[in-house]
Every structure is written in C-alpha cells, then in structure tokens.
Image (spheres, rainbow, N blue to C red):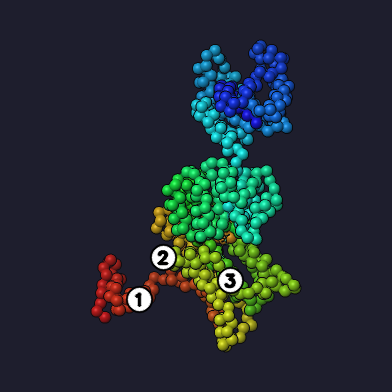
Amino acid sequence: MVIVVMGVSGSGKSTVGQLLAETLQLPFFDADDFHPEANTIKMAQGIPLNDQDRLPWLENLNHHIKSWDVQEGAVLACSALKQSYRDILERSVSIYWVYLEGSFTLIKERLDQRHNHFMSSQLLQSQFDALEAPKKAFKISIEESPEQVVKKIIKDLKNMNNAEIGLIGLGVMGKSIARNLLSRGCKLAVYNRVTAGEEKVVTNFINDYSNDDLHGFTNLEHFVNSLETPRKILCMIPAGSPLDDLIKAIDPYLEKGDILIDGGNSYFQDTQRRIDSLSEKGIQYLGVGISGGEQGALKGPSIMPGGQKEAYVQVAKYLESIAAKDDNGLACCTYIGPQGSGHFVKMIHNGIEYAEMQLLAECYTLLKPWHDNDEIAQIFEEWNSTTLSSYLLEITIEILRKKEDGSYLLDQILDKAGNKGTGCWSSKIALDLGMPTSIMTQAVFARYISAFKTKRSQLSTLIQWPKIEEQPIEVQDLKKAYQLSRVVNHQQGFELIQNASQTYDWELNLSEIARIWTNGCIIKSTLMVQCIHVLKSDNNLFNNKDLMEELQTNETALSSVLIKALKHRLFIPCFTEALNYWVGMTTERLSANVIQAQRDYFGAHTYQKNDGTDRFYHTNW
Ligand code: 6PG
C-alpha cells in the first residue's frame, strides 16, 4: 500500500511521513525530490510553479506510486493541494490518504519557529487558497504531536479492512436495513445463525447483493473480529429471548467501548435491563425503534434511538444516513433520550398505529352496508387529498381496490387480526401510569374480539339483525368523526409519552418526536406535521385553539355517526371511545362522587369534598 501524507507547507508532512514509514518499516519519499529539472530551476529562482509545470511531476509520481504499490509499499509526503493533482496521483492505483489539518495561524507560528526557514504570510495564504480539502482521507489535526498522529493513523489502517458496522439477523427487516446501509456506501458485515432449512441465508444474501463492501458470516466470533473497533453491531432479531440468547453468545467476543444496537421492537424495560447489565462490562447499548416496515427499512425508515448519548453520537452518522428525510431534508432520526426511551417511544408509535388502523377499519364498517369497495376507496381518496391524508389511508385505498380472481381480495380475507404485542404493552403501561389512552386499548381489544371468530359466528345466528336503512351514512359526518377521533388518538398517545418522560425523567421532546414521525414510519400523516408545530409551544394538543375549535365543530357529526352505528349494530369501539374520552375530558362534573361514596361505604376508603381543601372525610353510612 502507498500512503500519501498531504497538507500545506509547514503542516509537518515530512516529520509525520518519516515517523510513519519507520514505524511501518516502509521506505519514505519526499515528493519534492521528483520534480523535473526545469521545475527545480524555476523553484531555485523563486518562481512559483503553475499547474502546467506540475503536470510532468505528478505523472512521474503516479508512475512511481504504481511501482511502489506492487513492491513493498511506501510513504510519500506530498502537498497534493488540489483534487485534480490527487486524481493524477491516484490514476490506476489506490492510495491511503492522510490529511494533516491545521489553521493558518498555527502553521505560520510553526514555520516562523523553524530554523533557516522563511515563508511569508502571503505565500502561505496562497497555499491555503489553493487547498481543496480532500473528502476521502484520514483527517487528523496537527495540534497533536507527530507520535500521536502516527498512532492514530496506524489505528485507522488496522481498521481499514474491517467493516464499519455489523448487522445480525437477515430476516425481512434485517435484509432491508443491510441493503439500505450498503446503498449509503457503508462497509458492512452481516451475520445470521445457521438453522435447519435455513443454511444458505447468508450465502444467498451475499450472492444477491454482491458488493466489495459486504462480508457475510455464519460464525459469530469471526463476524465480531471482522469489525472495526469500537464495534458497532445492529441486531435485527426478534425481541425477547432470542435477543437475550444472542447477547449471551456474543458477549465473550465483545470489548469495552463496543456498541450493541437493538433495532427490534423490544419492551423498553427489557432494554433498560440490558443497558444496565452490559454497562458493567463497559459495553454500550442502544434501544432503537425502527418503523416503516420492509419498504421503509429499505428506502428510509423513521428511527427512534434511546440509551447512552455517547453511544448514539458514535453511530449517529449510520442511523441518520439510512433514515427517511422530513419536509426540510432532515433525517427522521433523532436521539430520543436515555434508558429505554427509544423503545418506549416506538411502542407508543405502535399503540397510535393500532388505533389509526382500527379507525380506518371502522370507517370501512360504517360505509360497507351502503357502498362497494371501489366506492369506499373513492371516498377515502377524496379524504386523502385533504389534511386527513396519511400513509395508512393511502395503503387502505389500494387494499380496497385490489382484486384477485375477479373479486375484491379484501372480501376474501378472514376477519381475524393477530398482533405481536406492542399495542398490548402500550395499553398496560398506560394503565400503570394512570393514563387513559382508551382508543389504542380499544383497538387492541378489537383485535382480541376478532380472534373469537368461531364464537362470534355462533352467537351472530341468535341475533335479530336490524334492517339496513335506505339512507346511507352521511359521508361528511363520517369524515368529521374520523377527524375528531384521530386528534383524540394523537392527543392520548403524546400525553402518555409526556407522562412517561416526567415519570422516568427522560426529558423527551414531543415536537421532535412528531417530526421524526412525519416520514418513513407507519403513522406518518399531515396531522403529524401539524403536531410538530402545535407541540413546540404546548405538550397538550387540546390546548391548541385551532384544534380545539375543530374538535368542538366535529362533535355533532361524531354523535350522528354513533347513532347510526348503534341502530345497525355496527362494531366501532374506537369511534365510540373517542366520543367518550372527548366528552369525559370536557365535562366539569363527572359521576366519580358516586364512586368515592361507594368506596367509603364498603371500605372506609374516605372521600374528598367540593370544599377546595385537601381534607379526606369518612362517613358512617
Ligand atoms: C412499524 C410497525 C412494525 C410492525 C409492528 C406491529 O412501525 O414498522 O409498527 O413495527 O408492524 O410489529 O405489529 P403487530 O400489528 O403484529 O403487533
């Protein structure tokens, strides 16, 4: 290998180059010794060289570099200030560039201290003017001593052939993230364990996406050793025990400072446990929520990293490069906060997602008695051209129109929905924190109810079903009801995040969370863009005047929709809950006085009065 140490005069190229050559036991050359005679004469006369003069010199150097490259290699000190010079030097050969960076003042100071050396400020300035800092080089500040500089160069050289980042798990999401990283020019090592029937996962991936920057492994130790240090390893494997098993298996090969990144849908308290236990060994751990499904992961997901900030800083460039971009071109990836906060925020993203999906399913329920799938798609399409637009609405339109064997595919699909647990976790933690996120919980229950297919089928035969009225549901009312319910759903989700932020002392930025949810993720929507602005000034959407006015206006429409649904026995738990919550939260006096009294009656739990004091009373009922 040929190493070229470059920089302006006085940056210390020769000193560093010689020391580096000595340490690596390579020959050292100074580019100034390769000038043709005509140049040497010009320089001796104090006449500056122009680009034309430099051409034969650069050609000659390129010739030598090529021959050193096939021999034992070399270290060359050369100013190589312009990119066009470097292009000539690197013609048909690969060079490892070291760029010594320093400020004008520092270099001038050093030159002035040098014995027998004079360079006017003007001459040095002309070097700085000509300098085009290289993009592709190991950059190092000359403020460090030559010994330190050489040490760092050697460390980088050792890392050079190693992958920048490792990825474990070539499932659907893992493969897409791996391809995304490769497309950003990242040097990547992938690992997948070998299981019966899946022996060729790694080989197939390498064959399909063959790339000089990609290396595949089925041996965990070899995989870990192929990574530059500190190692950065992204785990894209199922949450729960598979992840714990992997951590146990990889732990012996990891060293202090290495970073493990969990890109799965892990429970946030599990993430916290893993952060704590790995930190005992000095291993850093990030819990990173990734949303967007297979396509998002490939083209740009929304990324929610949480854990140690220092660890995030070291992997930020990779995560931010693969993330989707928001309307202002910023990455939909931001450091969320400490501990398991990244996974917490992703969990609530999914809770909101469950409710958004169920609300659309309920719109379908409310339209289906009077409209065929194409008509429903048409209605949704109109909504999608307004502020109601969202990714979920968009895909639902396509789903409604999809035909297979001449009939709507949707009509052929069983009405029984599964889940992987994040909606349930969101609801459970909301209950623990005392937060009424009732819409997402109803969405979870709706999936659970759907699962009782056999029982439902039996019971439905016993029911006297009401006749469908001729008059269809008012689409304008439904649109307003949907609008209201979505705002309530988002309010509940953000309020839960805010509560967790205070409870766990995470200092989360709700507006920034909304920002990274405006692209790449499943719940991206125009409403989310609106939330960025609203949440900048207040953590509660209900405190926003415009949203509040809209909610008030839409209430009547929601009530009309519910009345129609009740009459026809239509199952719309999320719409119903949206109205309950909205009415409950905007009612001054609820019936909880009765509950207080009952508790005191049978259990002497005491109660408070409307007397404005903190006093608790007990009555012998
Ligand atoms: C996403 C999704 C993704 C997945 C969830 C939900 O943001 O990309 O939320 O993480 O769809 O696992 O799955 P369930 O509906 O099966 O719970």
Q: Nearer the viewer, mark 1 or mark 2?
A: 2
How many numbered marks does the figure carry?
3
Name which of mark 3 and mark 2 comes first in the sequence. 3
Assign ligand 1 to one image quadrant: bottom right
Circle 1: residue type? Ile
Q: Are marks 3 and 2 in contact (CB under 8 Å)?
A: no
Q: Which residue corresponds to mark 3?
A: 417
Answer whether residue 31 is visible to the viewer in this image: yes
Q: Residues within 10 Å of mark 2 (few under 14, many from 20)?
A: few
Q: Which mark is residue 432?
A: 2
In this rendering, position of residue 387 left or right of residue 432: right
Answer whether residue 143 is visible to the viewer in this image: no
Q: Residues within 10 Å of mark 1 (few under 14, many from 20)?
A: few
Q: Which residue is rendered at x = 49% and y = 62% of the image?
A: 493
In this rendering, position of residue 117 left or right of residue 310: right
Is 238 or 521 nearer to us in this picture? 238
Q: Secondary structure at mark 1?
A: helix
In this rendering, position of residue 566 left or right of residue 339: right
Q: Which residue is rendered at x = 61% and y = 26% of the image?
A: 26
Q: Secondary structure at mark 3?
A: loop
Coordinates of residue 367 in the picture (x, y in percent): 62, 75
Q: Residues within 10 Å of mark 3 (few under 14, many from 20)?
A: few
Coordinates of residue 57 in the picture (x, y in percent): 71, 21
The span from disc 1 to disc 3 (Cα, nearest Å) is 36 Å
Taking 143 as reference, is 318 above or below it?
below
* The quadrant where residue 597 appears: bottom left
In what quadrant of the picture does the C terminus appear? bottom left
Name which of mark 1 and mark 3 comes first in the sequence. 3
